[in-house]
């Protein structure tokens, strides 16, 4: 394997030394909103060196020792994000191993953490804490090699108030109570990249789904969560069928407060999810299929740096849709794929970035860049479309699935670059070299804008959605819209109808009003439907609908929604000040990552 030797988002000297294991001892302090304690890094030299260089951000480093001896260290501030920690050590030879001990505390407002007062939780009884380390925030809670190129195991002992539960991205062990504190123990025995380190502390209850799956949530939510995610074991089995054995032991879910900036996060053994997935009818389960898929694509085979992020997300969307296809039929898979192309990839290229923007390339250049700025639907949708296109060129879904299994087998427990994948593709399909040679890899991977080819999609399910949307967009008179069928559609089909309408916006006020009333859109429990409707409001600048949009950005913390909505609201003169006002009001309960992203949007906007 060609080991990717650089990571523009980390300054750690992982070319010289690697971390093989970390032992963590933490104390969670809700009063000071800090995590503090110690960690022991087990390191192994690849080259002779006298330096250990780690990533950090705002950490209060109290001491660094190795085998009892104090080590000198200094910090330099990085130009984009965080600090570099330079540690002087006794010389170490290739192959030699050593331990280094750190005592530290997380800083004020550590970017990986959100501490929430009890009033901001569902049950309003106890405070809550959760972490979000992907992509580069782990460095704000412990000194580490914050690069996905390095993988290691970890163990942890965490002290929290005794009436709360602590969970981590690992298998839980003993719990010991003494006085008003409880110590929870964890072990992750599969090597992971550090961005998968995760912790959650709160008033949590558990419902078992199967022998290896359970749902955790605040007491008043836990039963509806268990109902919503009841298909988890079935999905996990289907994923194993497609991808190979599940190596992580448990697959649990934990429902976080609404400020969690993602739909789901694939923390090993414990996927984190937004409460907005609880729609009451299991209609948002594809997010769970996605996070399950990451157990292979991302967590087992990992992108070597964030420039190759499509290896994580593009493969995961591809596998997610394979799972959905196995469970609900190939037509459903095809439907989801074409929606991905039309409603997620195209708007991202045309509206969010513009067709020549380098962040619309599958492989990005992150030299001197904040990985947060490059985050978009591109790696997800352009990436999965590329795999689907290759599958169709090969001409057999079965053979491509064999390839996928062989790829996962070959690169499991490793971190790889796009070139590693491409070399293995040629190796596996050695007998199909002529077909592969005709694929325009360079344009797909390195050029911005719309991909050079479009996969062929079965459009059976999408036709009815398009037809219904057309009635709304093309009729001169709302009274002439006769075709209903909406209520009989699945939530995903309903979303697609609205997405088709959105693509034709602005729409006249009368029409939106009638659309909203006919389909009771602002009452939808499905956040995708509500989001598509909110976008119709914003794109049409329908003033009467503005309260719906302002409520949406306050209720749902997912960045996937916040980014496009804030962008539209800031550009809409009659809404702009209200949106800024709403944002400023929400800051105290918003996630630090979301605050950072929206602030940056306002700043860069001013520079245009
Ligand atoms: N791993 C991602 C979330 C992520 C990516 C966090 C990059 C930080 C940096 C997760 O698996 C994800 O993709 N979540 C999606 C949902 C999914 C169904 C597309 C989301 O939150 O929108
Ligand atoms: Zn993902």
Image (cartoon, grey):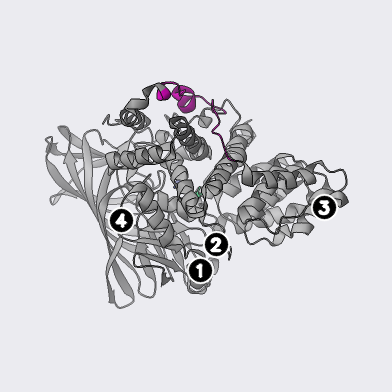
Q: Which mark is residue 227?
A: 1
Give the number of the mark in front: 3 or 2. 3
Give the number of the mark in front: 1 or 3. 3
The magenta stretch is: 435-458
Which quadrant of the figure has residue 313? Answer: top left
Give the number of the mark in front: 4 or 2. 2
> Mark 4 — residue?
248
Q: Which mark is residue 62?
A: none
Circle 2 crowding by C-alpha within 10 Å: few under 14, some 14–19, many from 20: some
Badge 4 or badge 3: first in the primary sequence: 4
C-alpha distance separating marks 4 and 3? 52 Å
- The quarter of the rendered structure image containing the C terminus is top right
Tell me: 244 left or right of 52.
Answer: right
Q: Is residue 221 above or below residue 51?
A: below
Is disc 1 placed on a helix, strand or loop?
Answer: helix
Q: Is residue 230 above or below residue 597?
A: below
> Mark 2 — residue?
282
Q: Residue furthest bottom?
A: 179
C-alpha distance separating marks 1 and 2? 8 Å
Q: Which residue sits at x=25%, y=47%?
A: 152
Between 274 and 583, the one lying in front of the other is 274
């Amino acid at each position: 394997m060609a080991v990717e030797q650089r990571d523009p988002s980390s300054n750690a000297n992982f070319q010289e030394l690697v971390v093989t294991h970390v032992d963590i001892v933490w104390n969670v302090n809700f009063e000071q909103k800090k995590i503090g304690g110690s960690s022991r890094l087990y390191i192994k030299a690849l080259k002779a060196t006298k330096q250990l260089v780690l990533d950090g951000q705002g950490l209060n480093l109290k001491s660094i020792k190795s085998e009892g001896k104090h080590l000198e260290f200094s910090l330099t501030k990085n130009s984009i994000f965080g600090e570099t920690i330079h540690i002087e050590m006794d010389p170490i030879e290739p192959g030699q191993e050593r331990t280094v001990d750190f005592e530290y505390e997380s800083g004020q407002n550590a970017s990986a953490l959100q501490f929430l007062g009890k009033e901001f939780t569902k049950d309003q009884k106890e405070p809550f804490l959760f972490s979000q380390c992907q992509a580069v925030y782990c460095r704000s809670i412990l000194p580490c090699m914050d690069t996905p190129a390095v993988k290691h195991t970890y163990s942890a002992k965490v002290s929290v108030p005794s009436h709360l539960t602590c969970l981590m991205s690992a298998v839980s062990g003993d719990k010991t109570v003494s006085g008003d504190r409880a110590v929870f123990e964890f072990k992750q025995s599969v090597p992971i990249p550090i961005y998968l380190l995760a912790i959650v502390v709160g008033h949590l209850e558990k419902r078992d789904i199967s022998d290896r799956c359970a749902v955790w949530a605040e007491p008043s939510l836990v039963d509806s969560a268990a109902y919503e995610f009841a298909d988890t074991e079935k999905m996990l089995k289907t994923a194993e069928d497609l991808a190979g054995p599940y190596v992580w032991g448990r697959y649990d879910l934990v429902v976080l407060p609404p400020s969690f900036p993602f739909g789901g996060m694939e923390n090993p053994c414990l996927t984190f999810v937004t409460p907005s997935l609880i729609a009451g009818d299991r209609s948002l389960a594809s997010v769970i299929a996605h996070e399950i898929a990451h157990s292979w694509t991302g967590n087992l085979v990992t992108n070597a740096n964030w420039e190759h992020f499509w290896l994580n997300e593009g493969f995961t969307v591809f596998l997610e849709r394979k799972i959905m296809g196995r469970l609900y039929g190939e037509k459903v898979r095809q439907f989801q794929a074409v929606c991905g192309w039309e409603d997620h990839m195209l708007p991202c290229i045309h509206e969010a970035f513009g067709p020549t923007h380098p962040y619309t390339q599958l492989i990005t250049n992150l030299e001197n860049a904040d990985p947060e700025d490059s985050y978009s639907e591109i790696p997800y949708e352009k990436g999965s479309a590329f795999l689907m296109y290759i599958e169709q060129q090969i001409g057999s879904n079965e053979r491509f699935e064999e390839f996928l299994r062989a790829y996962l087998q070959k690169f499991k427990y490793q971190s790889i670059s796009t070139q590693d994948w491409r070399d293995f593709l040629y190796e596996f399909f050695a007998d199909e070299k002529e077909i592969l040679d005709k694929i325009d890899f360079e344009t797909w991977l390195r050029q911005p804008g719309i991909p050079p080819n479009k996969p062929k999609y079965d459009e059976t399910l999408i036709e009815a959605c398009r037809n219904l949307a057309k009635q709304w967009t093309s009729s001169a008179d709302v009274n002439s819209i006769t075709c209903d069928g909406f209520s009989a559609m699945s939530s995903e089909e309903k979303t697609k109808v609205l997405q088709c309408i959105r693509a034709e916006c602005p729409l006249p006020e009368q029409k939106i009003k009638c659309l909203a009333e006919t389909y009771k859109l602002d009452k939808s429990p499905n956040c995708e439907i509500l989001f598509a409707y909110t976008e119709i409001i914003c794109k049409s600048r329908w003033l009467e609908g503005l309260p719906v949009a302002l409520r949406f950005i306050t209720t749902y913390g997912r960045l996937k929604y916040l980014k496009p909505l804030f962008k539209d609201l800031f550009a809409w003169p009659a809404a702009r000040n209200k949106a800024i006002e709403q944002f400023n009001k929400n800051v105290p309960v918003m996630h630090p990552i979301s605050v950072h992203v929206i602030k940056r949007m306002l700043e860069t906007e001013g520079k245009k």
